[in-house]
Image: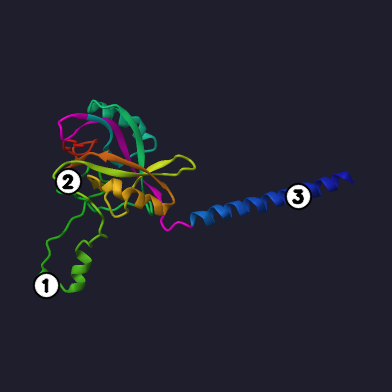
């Protein structure tokens, strides 16, 4: 008689554990659905080195700087990035993934005063065809011309090269990532001067995450994604603080 009782008891405990776990999973999903936005890793990550940045007094400060943002094979960033940093005589710090709302990226060049982040694209850049506007109707134009993006705060008023990207963090795990937009080439969004400091909490907050500040990013004047110099991207501008 003891054996059937033991079997019944085991089955009862299994049922309790199953329904308890189901409730926990449902609770986690409900908690995740509270936030309006999502954050999903893209195929892009940024290589971060410690580099000397010159300030307006011609003095150098050692700061974390995004050297290049590109797609990598699994584990490749941490393997190759130290060598990339060494080419610039800079210590390697870490690699950090770029997230967007969908995990996808676009081909829009996020240009500020003639410069953009040093991002190696995973596809050909946007090509605007020569259109015969006189021979097109309004529907043709709306389909063929690139559509404007939502307005973003850039805070770029001076002709310098102080640009930074926003870092968001899950406080529960300490995992952090670079904030991005799915329309941008490589996803990564940068701001000029104080723009990132003013905007980062606004970007991380709706995700239910903490803003962990901003990381300065290398920029280039090159606007042709087809002309990347090599694995570290394009010819870069002098970093200023």
- Where 97 sits versus 143, above or below? above
Choose between 71 and 169: the one closer to the eye: 169
As helix, strand or loop, the secondary structure at mark 3 comes to helix
In this picture, residue 37 sits left or right of residue 226: right
Choose between 122 and 45: the one closer to the eye: 45
- In the image, the segment drawn in magenta is 34-60
Relative image position of residue 59 (x, y in whole percent): 18, 29
- For label 3, the crowd category at 10 Å Cα-Cα, with few meaning under 14, some 14 to 19 and many 20 or more, is few
Q: Which residue is mark 2?
A: 115
As helix, strand or loop, the secondary structure at mark 1 comes to helix
In this picture, residue 139 sits left or right of residue 42: left
As helix, strand or loop, the secondary structure at mark 2 comes to loop
Earlier along the polypeptide chain: callout 3 or callout 1? 3
Q: Which residue is mark 1?
A: 135
Residue 74 in sight from this viewpoint? yes
Relative image position of residue 45 (x, y in whole percent): 33, 41
């Amino acid at each position: 008689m003891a054996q059937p009782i033991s079997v019944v008891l085991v089955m009862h405990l299994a049922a309790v554990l199953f329904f308890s776990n189901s409730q926990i999973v449902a609770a986690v999903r409900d908690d995740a659905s509270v936030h309006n936005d999502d954050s999903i890793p893209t195929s892009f990550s940024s290589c971060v080195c410690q580099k000397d940045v010159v300030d307006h007094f011609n003095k150098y400060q050692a700061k974390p700087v995004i050297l290049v943002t590109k797609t990598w094979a699994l584990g490749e960033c941490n393997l190759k990035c130290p060598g990339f940093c060494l080419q610039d005589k800079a210590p390697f710090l870490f690699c950090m993934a770029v997230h967007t709302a969908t995990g996808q990226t676009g081909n829009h060049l996020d240009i500020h005063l003639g410069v953009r982040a040093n991002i190696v694209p995973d596809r050909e850049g946007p090509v605007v065809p020569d259109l015969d506007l006189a021979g097109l109707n309004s529907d043709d134009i709306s389909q063929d011309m690139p559509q404007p993006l939502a307005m973003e705060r850039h805070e770029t008023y001076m002709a310098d090269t102080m640009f930074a990207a926003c870092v968001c963090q899950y406080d529960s795990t300490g995992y952090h990532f670079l904030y991005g937009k799915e329309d941008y080439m490589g996803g990564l969004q940068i701001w000029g001067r104080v723009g990132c400091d003013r905007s980062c909490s606004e970007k991380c907050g709706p995700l239910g995450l903490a803003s962990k500040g901003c990381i300065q990013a290398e920029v280039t004047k090159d606007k042709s994604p087809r002309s990347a110099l090599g694995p570290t991207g394009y010819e870069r501008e002098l970093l200023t603080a």
